[in-house]
Amino acid sequence: MKASDLFIKALENEGVEYIFGVPGEENLDFLESLSESTITLIVTRHEQGAGFMAATYGRLTGKPGVCLSTLGPGATNLVTPAAYAQLGAMPMMMITGQKPIKKSKQARFQIIDVVDMMRPLTKYTKQIVNSNVIASQIREAFRLATEERPGAVHLEFPEDIAQEDCAEELFDVVDYIMPKADSKAIDAAVKLIEEAKNPLLLIGAGANRKITCQALARFVDETGIYFFTTQMGKGVIDERHERYLGTAALSSNDFVHAAIDEADLIINVGHDVIEKPPFFMKKGGKKVIHVNFAPAEVDPVYFPQLNVVGDITSSVNLLADELKPQSHWDFSFYAKVREEVRGHLSTYFKDERFPMLPQRLVHILRENLGDKDVITLDNGIYKIWFARNYTCYQPNTLLLDNALASMGAGLPSAMAVNLLYPDRKVVAVCGDGGFMMNSQELETAVRLKLNLTVIILNDSAYGMIKWKQEDMGFRDFGLDYQNPNFVKYAESYGAHGYRPESDADFREILTHTLQTDGVHVIDLPVDYSLNHPILNVKLKQKTSEL
C-alpha cells in the first residue's frame, strides 16, 4: 500500500480522533490519505494554536493529541507547543513534512534540521527514512508519549517516503501496568509520617494526570492530615474540603507558605521540579517523602529523604492502609491558617468597583459555573488570583500552565475542551497580551461551531511584568500598548462581542453568553491596582503575624 495510507492507518490503530494543524505542500500525500480516514482534520490558523489544542487534548484524555505542520517555518512554529507539552507532561505527537530526502529538487530552500531542533524538546524525534518502519515508529512514538512522565514526540515524514509503496503492517497497542511501590518504601514512609509532629500533604500535577481523587480523599479523611496543591494539582480533592489549605500560587509569603514553614514533613504526591516549586528544601530542614511514578530528580532545592516509586494511586492507598493517626500530631496551626485563608480570599468577592478586580471576576465565575464546567487560563497576573481564589470542585476544571507558562494557550485550550466536552460550559480567561498572540483562532472556533465564552482582561499592558517591575522598584516603562476594538474584532470573525460598562452589566452579559450557543468575546476592563499592595506587601505582613 501507499506509505501515506499506512501512516494514517497506524494513527487510526492508535485511536486518534483529531489531527490539528496547518498542512503544506510537503503534506499533500498525507492529506489525501487523511481525506479517506475516520480521523477528523481540524485546520487551524497557526501551527501554535494547533499544538496547544493537541497538548490540551492529551492533558485531558491521557492519549496523545496529534498536530501537523509542513517543513521549515511550519515546524518552527510548533516549538513552543512542544515545550508546553513536554514540560507540562501532556502527551502529544507532532508530524512535520519535509522535502524529498533521496533526491533534492529545491536545494536547501526551507530546509532546516527539524529533528535536531526537536530533540531537546521531546521524548522521541525521528525522520522516517524507510516506509517499512512507519508502523513501528508510530507505535513507539505513542508508547513513549503516553508513558510516565508523558510528553511530546515528533516524526518527520518526507514527501518522497510518503509516496513509496510498502507492506501493510500494524502493531498491536499494548498497554502496561505501572508496578506498585516496594513494601519497604511504604513501611519507611509510614514510619516517617507517624513519627512527624506536623505532617503536611502536597498534591501535584502527577496526581491530577492519573486522577487519584478517591485514594487521596480517603487518605486525608482517614488520617486528618491537611493538604495544599500546586497550581497544576488543583481539584484532585474537592477544595471545599475542611482540610484544604490552599494553592501555592506565589513563590513565598502566602498563607500556604506559613503552613509549609510549620511542617516538619511534607508528603509530596505527584509533584516534580519542572512545575514552579511551592517550597525550597534546605539542608537540615524539613523532611520530604517523594511519592511518584519515578524517583525524584535531585535539585539544589529538592532532594527528598525517601522515594516511594510506583503507581501513585496504589502508593496512596497502601499508605492509607498502614497509617494510624497519632496522638502527637499537631494540626492546630494549620487550622488557624485555614481560617485566615478563608477570610482573606473572600475579601473582595463582593467589591463591585469597575473596572473589575480580578478577585471579583473569580467569584462571579465560581457562582455561575457548575461543578464540571471548565475555565482555561492564558498566562498573566490574573493566573495568580485564579490559582489562589478559585475553588475547584473537580479535577481539570481550571486548566492553567505552571510549567512552561506560555502566553497564547488560553483560547486554543478552551477550544479543545469544548470539542471533548460539548455538554460543559467553557470559559477562556485571557489577558489582552496573551489573547492577541493566538486571537486568529477565533475563526477556527466559529468555523467549528464551538460554544465558548472568551473573557479578555483589558489593561492595555503586559500586566504580570508590570507587577514584577513595581515590586523590584523599577520605573513604569516599556510595557504599555494599544488594543484593537475587541467587540468589532470578534464580530469580524463571526463571533459575538461585548464590552460591559459596569459590574451589573458584566454579570448580565456573562449569564447570556453561558446560556447561548456560539463564540462570545467579552472585553472586560480590569483593575490591577491592588496587585502590588496585596501580593507583595500585605500578604508578607499578614503571614509574618501568624
Image (cartoon, rainbow, N blue to C red):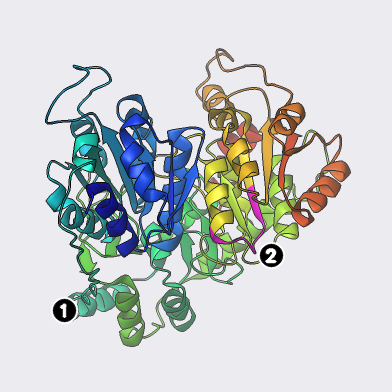
Camera-nearest residue between 67 and 533: 67
Percent position of residue 521, x then y:
71, 39
- Identify the residue at horizontal 23%, vertical 54% (top origin): 138
Residue 515 position, x and y percent, is 78, 56
Q: Residues within 10 Å of mark 2 (few under 14, many from 20)?
A: few
Question: On screen, 372 above or below 118?
Answer: below
Distance from the alpha carbon under mark 2 to that under mark 1: 43 Å
From the viewer's side, name the closer residue of 462 and 298. Answer: 462
Marks 2, 1: nearer the viewer: 2
Instruction: Left or right? Give the position of 112 relative to 24.
Output: left
Asked if residue 362 lies left or right of residue 162, the reply is right
**Residue 218: in sight, yes or no?**
yes
Q: Which residue is mark 2?
A: 370
Do callouts 2 and 1 mark residues in contact (Cβ within 8 Å)?
no
Q: Amino acid at mark 2?
A: Gly
Q: Is residue 461 magenta?
A: no
Residue 17: x %, y % from top left: 43, 58
**Type of secondary structure dominating the magenta stretch:** loop
Q: Which residues are magenta?
A: 420-427
